[in-house]
Amino acid sequence: MLQETSSIDTDVRGKYNQYNNLKTTLQTLTRKQTGNLSTKSLVSVVPPQLVIQDSDYLETHLVAVPNSSSKEFTRSYETLSSMVVPRSATFVSQDDEFSLYAVTTFKKHSQEFVHKCRERKWVPRDFKYKEGGKKEEEEEADRVAAEERKLWGETLRLCRTGWSEAVQAWVHVIVLRVFVETVLRYGLPLGFVCGMLTVCYFSLLAMINAAVLILCYLQTTRKQEKKARSGLDTAFSYLAGNAFGRDKKGRVIKDESSMGADMQAAGQMGDGGDYSAYVCYDLEVE
């Protein structure tokens, strides 16, 4: 039973992790298309003619500069490092936060130029032009989005199936515990009734019958659980012997002095360590 429940849990967690990984990938692709110029994909922003390709000596750098620093950049980029091509800075694009510039340097001093840009909080962007790159990115985003929707449906169906099977296994275990404890407490021959009590917003006392055993099914709040247990204690206090008494108004009260270590050792305490005249286990469903 426990092995079956563990297997269900493993399957559901595995599928859910797959969905989360795919969702993260989709979010990354979305940010590439919708972020600012310091993070988004530049495939649809940079014209291919601005990028020097297949040169043995020269290299084009794309730098995202905060709009507030644009004048400083255009004034000082030529002296950031050695061998920066004079007047090579070309404005490419601008958004609410950044302006994008293309600058040409000699490859020998490219790393120095990039390092100096980062020191001034300017963002060098890695970019290599690829024919058809924009269409490829869009197709990739569409493919991942379709897979994400499909995997979410599979995950949801598996969760529903797994939940149903897990609850069935859980209830089966609880019923076995109820039976064993009832036999240990009340002995043989068997003479008890096993029931399920749903805690809802209607009168609880009206549901109580002559059952010796009650299995509480909690569907709402702890306040209602307390009210349900109080009603059950009142109805079945006669089964508790000296453990229960009554106050001056006739209300059932528990005699703590009579609930010693013997009762606890005999397994007559509930899940919360609170003695009751009946065997009771809680099944909580949110």
Image (cartoon, rainbow, N blue to C red):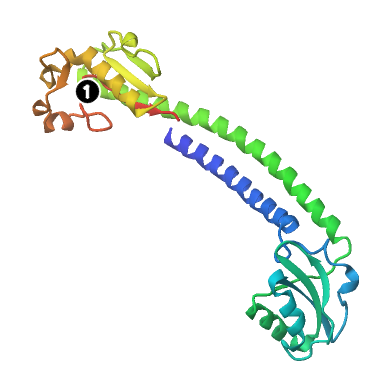
Coordinates of residue 31 in the picture (x, y in percent): 70, 56
Quick check: can you spot residue 188?
Answer: no
Q: Give 162 or 139, whichever is nearer the viewer.
A: 139
Quick check: can you spot residue 59?
Answer: yes
Q: From what the image shows, is residue 19 above or below residue 37?
A: above
Tally of numbered tags: 1
Name which quarter of the figure residue 103 lies in: bottom right
Q: Which residue type does callout 1 highlight?
A: Ser
Q: From what the image shows, is residue 23 above or below residue 56?
A: above
- Residue beneath disc 1: 276
Q: Give 141 or 97, whichever is nearer the viewer.
A: 97
Coordinates of residue 215 in the picture (x, y in percent): 34, 20
Residue 210 left/right relative to 265: right
Residue positioned 65% across, 48% down in the render: 23
Q: Give 229 or 153, whichever is nearer the viewer.
A: 229
Residue positioned 30% across, 8% down in the render: 209
* The residue positioned farthest toward the bottom in the image shown: 82
* The residue positioned farthest toward the left in the image shown: 257
Residue positioned 15% across, 20% down in the render: 253
Coordinates of residue 126 in the picture (x, y in percent): 74, 71
Residue 124 left/right relative to 134: left
Q: From what the image shows, is residue 213 above or below residue 33?
A: above
Q: Give 191 or 39, whichever is nearer the viewer.
A: 39
Indicate the quadrant containing the N terminus: top left, top right, bottom left or bottom right: top left
Q: From what the image shows, is residue 3 above or below residue 222?
A: below
- Identify the secondary structure beneath mark 1: loop
Coordinates of residue 91 in the picture (x, y in percent): 82, 72
Indicate the quadrant containing the C terminus: top left, top right, bottom left or bottom right: top left
Name which quarter of the figure residue 187 lies in: top left
Q: Residues within 10 Å of mark 1 (few under 14, many from 20)?
A: many
